[in-house]
Amino acid sequence: MRKKVIIETEHSNRKDAGQESFTEGLKVENLSKKYRNFQLGQVNFAIPPGNILGLLGQNGSGKTTTIKILAGHTKKNQGRIWINGVSLEKHPIQAKAQIGFMLEGPMFFENKSLWENGKAFGRFYPNFTEKNWRKWLSVCKLQPSSWLGLLSQGERMKFQFAFAMAHCPKVLLLDEPTGNLDPVFRREFLDILQEVVEEEQISVVFSTHLTSDLERIADQIVLLDQGRMLYADTIEHMQERYCLVKGGPKEGRDLKERGEPGIVGIQISQVGYEAMVDLNQSSDDFRNKIQQTDYEYETIDLSKWMYYMTKGGNNCGSYVETNQAV
């Protein structure tokens, strides 16, 4: 069972050096970034300590750009970010010292051992200790003497996670962390992550295309599409708001022709139809019929929800696909 989620954190009375009025965790306001052919715009969310936010979206939706901005690796055009109450813009050194991350790309010394890399980069983090470094290398089943340049992609992700945890972060930024992990360690990693997040009260952004991972561990979800934030709320609220309705092909055509405003997307084939319904936008009559089981309906999973939200373009009643079995 997931923990109770607080979408917005409360204000704290304690203000350390460099600390703003926002409390612990991660808070993002009106984040945007412009490139020549892409724009990330108006991203807002807050993650209290001990919570995991799943960042969803197709390739090119802005997930990695968001993660890199939060990590301080890419400059934003506008917006504000607080890391554990510290402004990333006003106090970057203090804020970055509290961030752990798993990102693709070269960031460490390829021709040095894992142990040497940890000691070299650990000096930039006040809370890094050799004791923690040794512990997390062991947890991730990595040999301290192994050369970084000889590791597989999966082992590199394990290395980054071990290093991040060795300096006791308050915010953890994970960009596709499980994509290259073997099935056994992937399951172990998710268990370890859930445990450490709750015990250490870490705020996590978990970007992935593997929706099954988020269904297992995420408290909140943010959906990006072509740089736009389509949705930000808890998974529980998403499943209360959206559902799948199914039936025969004639029933599907009738539903389409009626122009029911709650239909986000619909597929109709020769054997039947499937539609995703936004109960908040549905007419009272249609919503009551669903709740009274006049329609065959079921809880929607993250994979289908993301599909209809992005392919349907959030355009009520649009045909997502036709002539395919549902």
Image: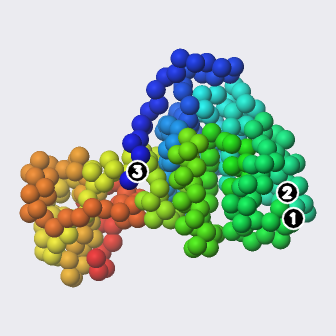
Q: Identify residue type, mark 3.
A: Arg
Judge from the rendering whether residue 287 lies leftward or rightward of residue 13; answer left or right. left
Task: Please state the horizontal and vertical placement of residue 234, each as a whole percent of the image.
Answer: 39, 46
Q: Are marks 2 and 1 in contact (CB under 8 Å)?
A: yes
- Give the residue pinned by disc 1: 145
Compare marks 1 and 3 and give the one earlier in the sequence.
3
- In this rendering, does residue 119 appear at all? yes
Picture quadrant of residue 326: bottom left
- Give the residue pinned by disc 2: 115
Residue extending farthest right: 111
Task: Please state the horizontal and vertical placement of residue 54, each as a whole percent of the image.
Answer: 49, 52
Judge from the rendering whether residue 208 lies leftward or rightward of residue 152; answer left or right. left
Judge from the rendering whether residue 140 lies leftward or rightward of residue 319; answer left or right. right
Q: Secondary structure at mark 1?
A: loop
Check disc 3: other Cα within 10 Å, few if <14, some if 14-19, many if 20+.
few
Q: Nearer the viewer, residue 307 or 213?
A: 213
**Which residue: 73% across, 61% down?**
138
Task: Please state the horizontal and vertical placement of residue 106, each as a whole percent of the image.
Answer: 79, 58
Q: Identify residue type, mark 2.
A: Trp
- Give the residue pinned by disc 3: 2
Q: Nearer the viewer, residue 49 or 22?
A: 49
